[in-house]
Image (cartoon, rainbow, N blue to C red):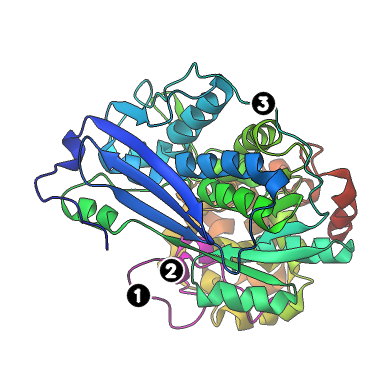
Amino acid sequence: MENLVSDAIQPRLTQVFRFVRCSYADGVAELVYAFDRGEELIERVRFPHAPPVVPKYAQAFEAALKALHLFAGVSYYKAGVPPKIELADGPLDDATADLLDALYLHGLAEFAYRNGLDLRGRVVFPRGGKAGAPAMTLGLPARTLVPIGGGKDSLVAVEAIKQAGGEATAVWVGNSSLIAACAERTGLPTLNIQRELAPGLFELNRLGAWNGHIPVTAINSAILVLASILYGFDSIAFANERSASAATLEYDGQQVNHQWSKGYVFEQLFSHWVRSHVAADLDYFSLLRPYAELAVTRAFAKLTPYFDAFSSCNRNFKILGPKPADRWCGQCPKCHFVFLALAPFLPKPRLLSIFGRNLLDDETQAAGFDALLEYQDHKPFECVGEGAEARAAMYALSQRPEWQEDILVARFRQEILPQLDASQLALEPWLEASVEHGIPARLHGALALFD
């Protein structure tokens, strides 16, 4: 076992964050970091039943491994946020440095906001290195990795690809039994990758490290690019909807978006980088990008076989702390939003049977729903839809007799609705597709699920 960090280290006073080295052997990627001249922090990512790296893919594999090393470093860098970043392999080419600067600045914007930090001008990756040879077309097999998160979005993406006749594998990182059950329910082949954080990170936390939200979708994206080269897939289809691009709030002139690495800006940056630096025929995109959350929940409302298996409740996915007794805690922003977003599209008894209770008939939940509506509060730091989207869903319910008597719907009609412009509350615009997306032509047929 690695040495844990010395008790002498004060994470917030460190001066240099070092990317020490990365390596791969026998299905295990080792990613090594350090602060100043301190002990090494070694993370391992395990790829099950990994085949040997195909020789003609070796250059692409090496580029993907280096990207994973750089991306996963965000988990450790944020512990001290030192003023200098040092790379063992020397400076990055400008395109890679631009990508990393953006990822660390915007992906850590919520972390910085909550901790009273300003990372602008502080996160600077060494640049000016020579770009490698342009990425080649590898002839990767025409099949898709679909990340499964246990919630409705990824299940909609799976069913859309199945409906279009595409060959796909359900993939997830970590050991959530709930995600494993959802992946099993899809009927697709499955791939479960394990990520083991360096034990020293937990020691740093004990010693007073900075802590907070990281762009985990970006790290998982880098893991799946490596997996695509290793196992042979030509596309990675995330399930990030249009609403993910909307900022949670603006603070001191900077947009703060809890979902930045699920947004369209990151998707475009990373997709372009993958095609230019890893493999010219590897597509990274979100299948749900044209759609708002409400369009996705309408599509999910048709997928009844998943109703007793899915959960978007974040308390199910915490590393530490209590889990809900069933799949829904009924208290968190994700529970509130999924309940509200599904309500216009499901018979009320069916929705109540999924959650086991009526969240809109409980006055203790008022503050949670107010935040979703951006009423007297900003949108929660969670993966939830836009405030205007939540208001449209609540307005739709307020017009339906079966919902009007519920405490929070009645309160919306009496207290909040008079302050709103009813002409801006229609549900229909949220169900229309945007033309902005990066979905490859061979998977356009998958969008038929939304018709």
| Residue 35: percent from left, percent from top | 25, 38
Q: Are marks 1 and 2 in contact (CB under 8 Å)?
A: yes
Q: Which residue is mark 3?
A: 133
Q: Residue at x 85, y 56 (%)?
A: 446
Give the side of residue 75 with respect to residue 279, left or right.
Answer: left
Local packing at callout 3 (Cα closer than 10 Å; few below 14, some 14-19, many 20+) is few
* Dot 3: element: loop
Task: Check residue 322 in the rendering and tell me which mark sits there, or answer none.
Answer: 1
User: Residues under labels 1 and 2: Cα distance?
Assistant: 7 Å
- First in residue order: circle 3 vs circle 1: 3
Instruction: Report the front residue among 354 and 184.
Output: 184
Query: Residue 261 sits in which quadrant?
Result: top right
Tell us which disc is closer to us: 2 or 3. Answer: 3
The amino acid at mark 2 is Arg
- 130 relative to 451, above or below: above
Q: Residue at x 32, y 35 (%)?
A: 18
| Residue 68: percent from left, percent from top | 51, 45
Q: Quadrant of the N terminus?
A: bottom left
Residue bounds of the magenta highlight: 306-335
Q: Residue furthest top?
A: 128
Q: Are marks 2 and 3 in contact (CB under 8 Å)?
A: no
- First in residue order: circle 1 vs circle 2: 2
User: Residues under labels 2 and 3: Cα distance?
Assistant: 45 Å
| Residue 394: percent from left, percent from top | 63, 58
Give the side of residue 254 with respect to residue 432, left or right.
Answer: left
User: Residues under labels 3 and 1: Cα distance?
Assistant: 49 Å
Q: Residue at x 48, y 45 (%)?
A: 215
Q: Which residue is mark 2?
A: 315
